[in-house]
Amino acid sequence: MTTTHDQWRAHARAAQETDRQVRRLYHLAYRIAPIGRILTNPNATADRVAYALTRIPRASAAAARLLTRPGVADHLETPYALSFLTTAERALTAPSTQLLKTANTARAAATAAAANNDDLRYVLFSDIEDRCRYLVDAAHTGWTRHEHATSKAVLDLAARWGLSPDAQPTDGDQPPVPAHIAQEAARRAEIRTRCAAGIRCTRTTCLAYGAVWTHDGTGQGPFLCPGCIPAANAERAAHGFAPTLKAVPGGVPDHARYSVTLYNGSGPGRRTVTCTTPQEAQFTAETVRPFNNTGYTIHVTTTP
């Protein structure tokens, strides 16, 4: 049968429309690909994970609608376009996604535990978060049987402590914790008790807590206990430094803030944490370890 000019134009328009719909499908799937990679990032935050978990199903629904258009499902470019979307869809049910959700839940729970001075829960939840993020990172190179077993163990532990959607209600008794977690929590509690007296004297030969803020009349001086001030002045005089250090009259103002600078003692890198009390500042200095060889300094700022 001879094809008329009008029929040829109709076929051309239909082919153009199919190509346009396939391009829409391709752009949709291509844009969703980096969103799917959020679920494989060990440092993904709760907001980013929630964003990916919302956007990927929406993209899948939109792609399904496009596939119902005439000619789209049978187009030669459709499988390639769908490959981007398929990768993102697989991430929704991958083990790393559940680990990321558990890690972010554990981070929020650890923050709340720290605010309540609950050392056991802080240590436990921080450990669960670290282990979950490690496993997400290890998934890039493939898991061994050891990683599979570790994933099951950490998710089971999180569930027993109410950190996962599969958590089962407990009978009020505290679930057991690994021995190393209990030991670390006891260590933090011991440090908290020591820091109750205040900031530690900065002289390396002194281990006393409750040091006072000093100055030399030209700028902020170190924190020293009263017994170390004369010895520090003697050392300064021997090196030709003047004037002498004195305790700040009235001590640290009530509205002052404490700036704890944590630095890498064997390389580049530093981090600053702002605290509201001397006890919090000293506790932060002794428990936060962002580097393998972490040192610290504590300064006072009067910014409210």
Image (cartoon, rainbow, N blue to C red):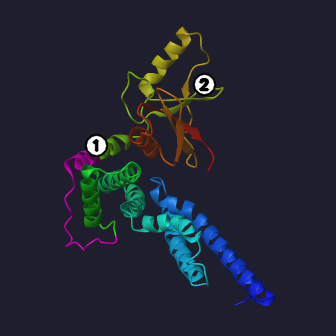
User: The residue tagged with tag 2: helix, strand or loop?
Assistant: loop
Query: Toward the viewer: 30 or 258?
Result: 30
Q: Is residue 66 above or below residue 266?
A: below
Characterize the local packing of mark 1: few (<14), some (14-19) or many (20 or more) Cα atoms within 10 angstroms: some
On the rendered structure, is 249 left or right of 179? right
On the rendered structure, is 138 left or right of 258? left
What is the three-letter code of the residue carrying label 1? Arg
Q: Is residue 198 above or below residue 87?
A: above
Give the position of the N terminus as an image quadrant.
Answer: bottom right
- Where residue 100 appears, as percent x and y from the top left, is 41, 60
On the rendered structure, is 244 left or right of 10? left
Q: Is residue 282 magenta?
A: no
- Where residue 246 appears, as percent x and y from the top left, is 55, 26
Which residues, given as a range, are shown in magenta?
A: 165-186
- Where residue 111 appears, as percent x and y from the top left, is 42, 57
| Residue at x-position 38% and y-position 21% | 205
- Where residue 288 appears, as percent x and y from the top left, is 42, 42
Q: Is residue 176 magenta?
A: yes
For label 1, the residue is 187
Q: Is residue 221 above or below residue 149?
A: above
Q: Which residue in the rendered view is the most extreme toward the right?
A: 5
For label 2, the residue is 216
What is the three-letter code of the residue carrying label 2? Asp
On the rendered structure, is 116 left or right of 232? left
> Which quadrant of the view contains residue 19?
bottom right
